[in-house]
Amino acid sequence: DTGVSQDPRHKITKRGQNVTFRCDPISEHNRLYWYRQTLGQGPEFLTYFQNEAQLEKSRLLSDRFSAERPKGSFSTLEIQRTEQGDSAMYLCASGQAFIQDTEAFFGQGTRLTVV
Amino acid sequence: EDQVTQSPEALRLQEGESSSLNCSYTVSGLRGLFWYRQDPGKGPEFLFTLYSAGEEKEKERLKATLTKKESFLHITAPKPEDSATYLCAVRSGGSNYKLTFGKGTLLTVNP
């Protein structure tokens, strides 16, 4: 395992459809983060898991967004009833707790286009 | 609320022309300042973490420094392959380990 893996890399969907993205973190990492990045902006925090527990959610994460991390391994991010404003790059990152503030390593992202 | 401001927004250099990127921050209890490189269409690639004022780290042609209010990413004798967006982010004590990012500096190095 050489890094954070995200699937799919690209997704085009029609407005109103549901989409789900998957993130596989670095195997020994127990922290997992989701971020969203739009063109010309830095990544914005969406939510954070430590093991299977979702410990923080951003106000950016509306009720249409839900994230899970069953068994503290991979994570999924689902967007229901997609809107054009959801078009963005969705990034996953992972890190290791109980080691001095470990770096967050990012995956290659999932580019979502809502048409 | 944590804030990060990066300048300039864009920087164009000739190959071999050294320069610096700036990252100013406001944070409650800094738990790390992070620099990433991002190529178009890809996720951020980790470069450095700095934890306390006065700390410096180097990697190839890049050197990152940290004061109590800002960080600099110095690029010495850049090459065209250094062209990318450079992102700065902070992690604060009360942030539950999330990162707050600036908008980035788009660096273009011409041959």
Image (spheres, grey):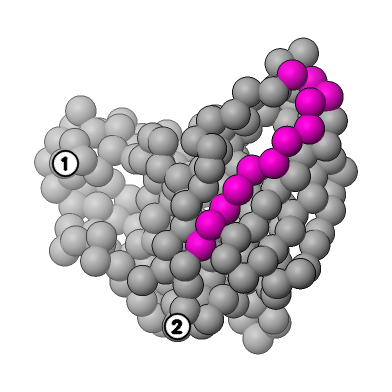
Q: What x and y, as percent, mark residue B95?
A: 44, 77
Q: Amino acid at mark 1?
A: Glu
**Label 2 residue SS:** loop
Q: Residue at x 14, y 47 (%)?
A: A81
Marks 2 and 1: CB-CB under 8 Å? no
Q: Chain of mark 1?
A: A
Q: What x and y, as percent, mark residue A105?
A: 62, 58
Q: Residue at x 67, y 52 (%)?
A: B72
Q: Is residue A78 visible?
A: yes
State whether residue A6 is above or below residue A67: above
Q: Main secondary structure of the magenta part?
A: strand
Q: Chain of mark 2?
A: B
Disc marking residue B8: none
Q: Quadrant of residue B52?
A: bottom right
Q: Residues within 10 Å of mark 2 (few under 14, many from 20)?
A: few
Q: For residue B39: magenta?
A: no
Q: Residue at x 78, y 32 (%)?
A: B18
Residue lying farthest to the top in this orientation: B111
As measured in the structure, the alpha-carbon distance from the residue carrying label 2 to the one carrying label 1 is 32 Å
Q: Residue at x 70, y 82 (%)?
A: A99
Q: Nearer the viewer, mark 2 or mark 1?
A: 2
The foreground one among A85 and B106 is B106
Residue position for label 1: A83
Q: For residue B20: magenta?
A: yes
Q: Quadrant of the N terminus of chain B?
A: bottom left
Q: What x and y, as percent, mark residue B54?
A: 76, 69
Q: Is residue A34 visible?
A: no
Residue position for label 2: B94
Q: Quadrant of residue B65?
A: bottom right
The foreground one among B63 and A107 is B63
What range of the chain is rendered magenta? B14-25
Residue A107 left/right relative to B98: right
